[in-house]
Amino acid sequence: MKKLNSLIRTVVAASTLAFVSIAAHAATITLKADLKASAEVPAKDSTGTGTLTATLDTDTNELKYHIEFSGLTGPVVAAHFHGPAAAGTNAKPQIPIKTSPLASPIDGKATITPEQAKDLVDGKWYFNLHTSANPGGEIRGQLVKSE
């Protein structure tokens, strides 16, 4: 009986350590972006501004986001996360925002691939909002890690 109790304690202890080890590898990374017309490529003449805050769960690659904006030339007709691209360069959309209407604030989530997650964490994604007057994008912001 002593041996069985010892074995059970050993199994429980090992299971607990394994769980803690697995949980230690998962992390939540916080990201942000300041959305402005001057960050568009080419830069736009707009009083529009906005902010984006997001979290990435590195275990599930789930990206949750919150976007607020105001002062645009008209209603938003499209919104996307783009990448991979450094600030000052353009890239194709990675995640289209399918909310309708596209009004502030926008909250959502998406599961991304490991490759997309790496580009995102490395600062190679941006977000932009498109209007009829600025179909290529009116305000844009590069996503960066937030403290």
Image (cartoon, grey):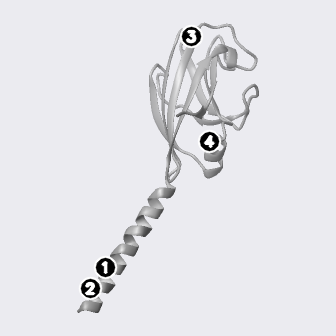
Q: Residues within 10 Å of mark 2 (few under 14, many from 20)?
A: few
Left or right of 17? Residue 146 is right
- Amino acid carrying label 2: it is Asn
Residue 9 is tagged as 1
Q: Residue at x 66, y 49 (%)?
A: 115
Left or right of 71? Residue 132 is right
Q: Residues within 10 Å of mark 4 (few under 14, many from 20)?
A: some
Labels 4 and 3: the sequence-earlier one: 3
- Amino acid carrying label 1: it is Arg
Task: Report which quarter residue 119 is drawn in.
Answer: top right
Q: Comparing marks 1 and 4, which lies closer to the viewer?
A: 1
Count of numbered circles in the view: 4
CA distance separating discs 4 and 3: 28 Å
Relative to the observer, which residue lies in front, 28 or 117?
Answer: 28
Q: Comparing marks 3 and 2, which lies closer to the viewer?
A: 2
Q: Is residue 6 above or below residue 104?
A: below
Labels 3 and 1: the sequence-earlier one: 1
| SS under mark 4 | helix
Would residue 130 be visible to someone looking at this image? no
| SS under mark 2 | helix
Q: Comparing marks 2 and 4, which lies closer to the viewer?
A: 2
Q: Which residue is mark 3?
A: 72
- Amino acid carrying label 4: it is Val
Q: Which residue is mark 4?
A: 121
Q: Which residue is mark 2?
A: 5
Q: Position of residue 62 (x, y in %)?
A: 50, 45
